[in-house]
Amino acid sequence: MMVPSPHSLSMELISALAYKAHGLLDFVIALTLSSILLIWYYRNSESRQKHPLPPGPKKLPFIGNNLDMPRTDKHITFARWAKEFGSDILHLKIAGENYIVLNSYEMAMDLLDKRSGIYSGRPHVTMLHDLIGWEGDLVYLPYGNEMKLHRKLFHQEFHPNDSSLYQPHHKKALRLFLNNLIDTPEEWLGHIQQMSRSVILAIAYGIHALPKDDPSIAAAERMFSVLNIAAIPGSFLVDIFPILRYVPSWFPGASFKQKAQKWYGIRNATITPPFLQVKQAMATGTAEDSFSLRCLMNAQSPHPHPDKLSEEEERIKQTAGTLYEGGADTGITSLRTFILAMMCFPNVQQEAQEELDHVIGREQLPDYDVLDNQDSLPYLWAVIYECFRWQPIVPLAIPHKSDEEDTYQGYYIPKGSIVVPNVWAMLRDERTYGPTAHTFDPKRWLLQIQGRWKLNPDMHDPLSATFGFGRRACPGKHMGLSAFKMNVASLLHSFNITPSPGKDGNSSPTKVQYISGMLNSPAPFECSIKPRSAKHVTLVQQVLLED
Ligand code: HEM
């Protein structure tokens, strides 16, 4: 029996309706309906390919998996689906877009790294790009020349062999942070935020933040909070049904429109003033060392006017803006996860402190060089790996986009697919990490040889998944890792982290709860961070005076 194709069905629909049409309106309706049918048919024409699409939840006509896409904790749902469908590669159809979810490290490497010529694009997110007007951000630039120029600027200044830009700023802010913890330990979270954001402000623009309530820090916080909410495709209904962008803001349920109006242009408005400040300071010879200054000094074609920007300077502004918008929150989130882990696992904390006491002693604070040596501080490194593994900071990395069609393991991957590496699932994989994959246990990274710890060379470290893949892998990796290591070692060296005692003096068990946006952040929690001894207090205060 011949089954009519949607194409012939739609032609019949047109003629039938046109025949019955009493006027132009009916004809337009007929034309619109049949166009939708045709678009749907052609967008689904992958099914006519030789290879099948990867498995995934059942698709409904027209709406595909729109109703299946979870609004939060997507990484957990994707990992569950991988088990249910017995496949690490999944396919979803959302708003006519193909989503390919990769739940294993090998698959992510096969596609995003080994075939990075195809899989290095970025998806377009309706809410973020069209309604909020988020533009010029390296994180979302399509694969191509402009993206490469932005990444080149990043690599120039965040090279693993040259930490001269970020280490001095970080060291200064860290020493202040440790002293602030001694003075007002109950404000520990505010101190972490102040440290991370002031470092980035100094690195990006050479601007020194006020000790409290700095307006540039507040502006960066507002900008990042918008990105964190709107960056993941599908976080707003309008990403799933882009046609909704045309509904008026007063329409019931269109609160996204009001949000978009409030946030419109926030990125450009936030990143332009500090950059112009650097350019103006450069003209008067008063600019301090920073990413912006270094790039501006290398610029081949600067605009002669201090308030105006050439195309090249505009690019530098955008790249510094990417740093300003996103460089701090990954650091804040990773440190909060570390603190939560130390509260929950006091034995781990004690063992790491014993190792630091043995290797560094109580007469000096940890320094960058010592920490780079994995052989001398294997337990500390194992704690660092385990923090990144247990609660990956960016659980779905940032989605890539395929710029060509492809086949992989017998499955068809359409051109333009949004490819989501599920880092969380990779780092919680029971096939790699065994039945304890969901618990925090630094010893999984270690071997004990003649009573001493050594990092197990057979365990593949988690960093290559934590920081993303291929040509879009995180260009801030070296700085992010270096800062995290120093923060963790300094806290462990001089402070004890424990649960906060309640009003009755007893502490209740700590709950491990996470809130997922683009970042996977611990839900707010209380804790107590106190110096380990009077000697540690003196040491921390002394090093501050050295600056
Ligand atoms: C612990 C800290 C950090 C973690 C875990 C992290 C993780 C990531 C991940 C997973 C991606 C997506 C990679 C992909 O698409 O495959 C990414 C991209 C990116 N990260 Fe980081 N990051 C961290 C710190 C930083 C810092 C400090 C900076 C700035 C200096 C930075 C700048 C960027 C930029 C610009 C991109 C976009 C790159 C592109 O699209 O080409 N990151 N990061």
Image (cartoon, rainbow, N blue to C red):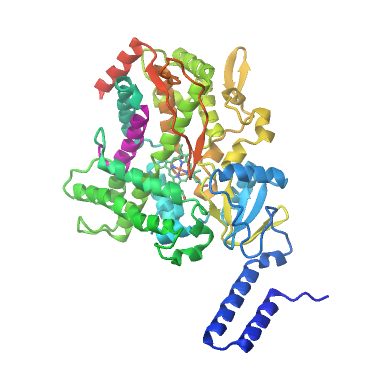
In the rendered view, would you say 17 is above or below 291? below
Residue 302 x %, y %: 26, 57
Where does the magenta region start and end? 188-209
Task: Choose top left, top right, bottom left or bottom right for residue 435.
Answer: top right
Hey, which residue is sitting farthest top in the picture? 534
Residue 136 seen by the camera: no
In the image, 201 versus 190, the foreground residue is 190
Quarter of the image with the C terminus is: top left
Residue 28 x %, y %: 54, 82
In the image, 481 versus 71, the foreground residue is 71
Side of 212 where 466 appears, left or right: right
Hey, which residue is sitting farthest left in the picture? 284
Hey, which residue is sitting farthest right in the picture? 1
Task: Choose top left, top right, bottom left or bottom right for residue 58.
Answer: bottom right
Q: Find out whether residue 192 is within the magenta segment.
A: yes
Residue 433 x %, y %: 65, 31
Side of 49 where 198 appears, left or right: left
- The count of marks equals 0
Quarter of the image with the N terminus is: bottom right
Name the residue at 38% across, 17% down: 530
In the rendered view, would you say 49 is above or below 423? below
Side of 256 where 22 appears, left or right: right
Name the residue at 32% across, 43% down: 204
Residue 11 seen by the camera: yes
Name the residue at 35% across, 53% down: 267
In the image, 496 versus 32, the foreground residue is 32
Residue 272 x %, y %: 28, 53
In the rendered view, would you say 483 is above or below 509? below
Dominant SS of magenta comes to helix
Side of 487 where 79 appears, left or right: right
Q: Find out whether residue 186 is within the magenta segment.
A: no
